Amino acid sequence: MTVLAVSKLSKRYRRGGKPLAAVDDVSFEIGPAETLALAGPSGSGKSTIARLVLRLLEPDAGRIEFEGADFLSLSGATLRARRARLQMVFQDPLAAFNPRATVARVLDDPLRIHGIASRAERPRRIAALLERVGLDAGLAARAIHEISGGQRQRVAIARAIATQPSLIVLDEAVSALDVSVRGQILELLLDLQRQERISYLFISHDLGVIRAVAHRVVILDAGRVAESGEARAVIDNPQSTIGKALVAATPKLNRNTPP
């Protein structure tokens, strides 16, 4: 079964009184335990697509099917229930979370909101989530602003997997981390994918990272698909003008193969 199918998705804004196509007739699919990357320069539509998929924005045209259902037709309680299966990890957890909230509070929210565990059970679930992402359970009492960037991103991943999603959208989720921490987070994501069969929509400007972790890639330019295909093949031999420019601008590509 296809986890996510996006068909002819479009979103337009008005800038200076003129229409601007942020996303223009974009289509792609993601299968179970598959990583599809969206790549492209700033303004190419990557993050807009992520927000459309998550229903944080509504498209002007197109169709989104999630786990076989028409995702755009859902509303109210039905949409909230289905959203438990679709989560997001942002670039900056400090912007996504209340920085003064404790780690425990951040992880408690999805368990409470989606009725996953009783109040008595939640501390044990929170400890298990922290351990699953390589953090000490004692970190639960710390405030988000008191922990390191790498720890915050692990907490963000723990929050994302708390609802046992089938798909996680990662919007530049490792770009703000230093190289050593970035590698650790990518290994964690790959491990979770192998163990939990999670699919990823991986948004990044870093083709080296994409080549290392993604199975397929879609390269965007001005809201449209410039080219797509198996990640290593596209990055090693791009056919589009923008694909060639992105490869040329990447100093050193990671030649590891994805799982």
Image (cartoon, grey):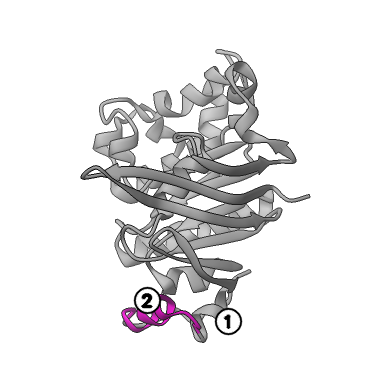
| Residue marked by disc 2 | 246
- Residue 213 position in % (x across, y down): 53, 67
Q: Of 166 and 39, which appears nearest the observer?
A: 39
Q: Up-down: is 254 above or below 89?
A: below
Task: Give the residue drawn at x 31%, y 60%.
Answer: 42
Provide the residue span drawn in magenta. 238-250
- Residue 103 position in % (x across, y down): 38, 30
Question: Callout 2 environment at 10 Å: few (<14), some (14 to 19), or many (20+)?
Answer: some
Q: Amino acid at mark 2?
A: Leu
> Image check: 97 left or right of 80?
left
- Cα separation between marks 2 and 1: 14 Å
Q: Amino acid at mark 1?
A: Ala
Task: Give the residue drawn at x 49%, y 79%.
Answer: 235
Q: Residue furthest right?
A: 1
Task: Give the residue drawn at x 47%, y 61%.
Answer: 224
Disc number placed over residue 144 in the picture, else none: none
Q: Earlier in the sequence, mark 2 or mark 1?
A: 1
Q: Of 36 and 193, which appears nearest the observer?
A: 36
Q: Of 251 and 10, which appears nearest the observer?
A: 10
Q: The residue tagged with tag 2: helix, strand or loop?
A: helix
Q: Up-down: is 60 above or below 37?
A: above
| Residue marked by disc 1 | 233
Q: The residue tagged with tag 1: helix, strand or loop?
A: helix
- Residue 53 position in % (x across, y down): 53, 42
Res. 237 visible in picture: yes
